[in-house]
Amino acid sequence: MIKQQKNLADATINQAVQMKRIALALEDRNAIERERNIILERKYSKKYQQTHNSSNIDYEDVSVIGINDIE
């Protein structure tokens, strides 16, 4: 009985740690997405669009890291 409770407690702790990692990864991803949006906003502002064609957006230079890439 005690061993079963210990195993359950360990599993609960492991699940909590995993959830915390996911939450931190999502926070990182959101921060990266905000930075990406700022870059795009600056790059494709009206002033920039006056001299450049906005249909040629280069998304590779502002790509977003996926949640699987953070771990």
Image: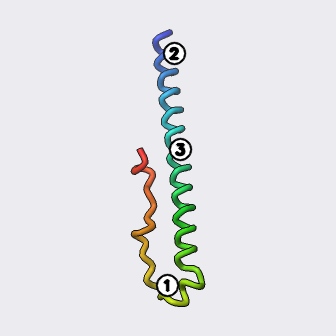
Q: Quadrant of residue 63?
A: bottom left
3D distance between C-alphas at marks 3 and 1: 34 Å
Q: Quadrant of residue 60?
A: bottom left
Rendered view: 31 above or below 59: above
Where residue 48 sits: x, y (%)? Answer: 54, 83
Residue highlighted by disc 1: 54
Tell me which residue sits at (43%, 57%) in the image: 65
Rendered view: 66 above or below 51: above
Q: Which amino acid, by three-letter code, is at mark 2?
A: Gln
Rendered view: 20 above or below 52: above
Colouring used for the render: rainbow
Residue highlighted by disc 2: 5
Figure quadrant of the C terminus: top left
Name the residue nearer the viewer: 7 or 24: 24
Tell me which residue sits at (53%, 32%) in the image: 16
3D distance between C-alphas at marks 2 and 3: 29 Å
Tell me which residue sits at (53%, 44%) in the image: 24
Where residue 52 sits: x, y (%)? Answer: 48, 87
Q: Which amino acid, by three-letter code, is at mark 1?
A: Ser
Which residue ends up furthest to the right in the rendered image?
A: 46
Residue highlighted by disc 3: 24
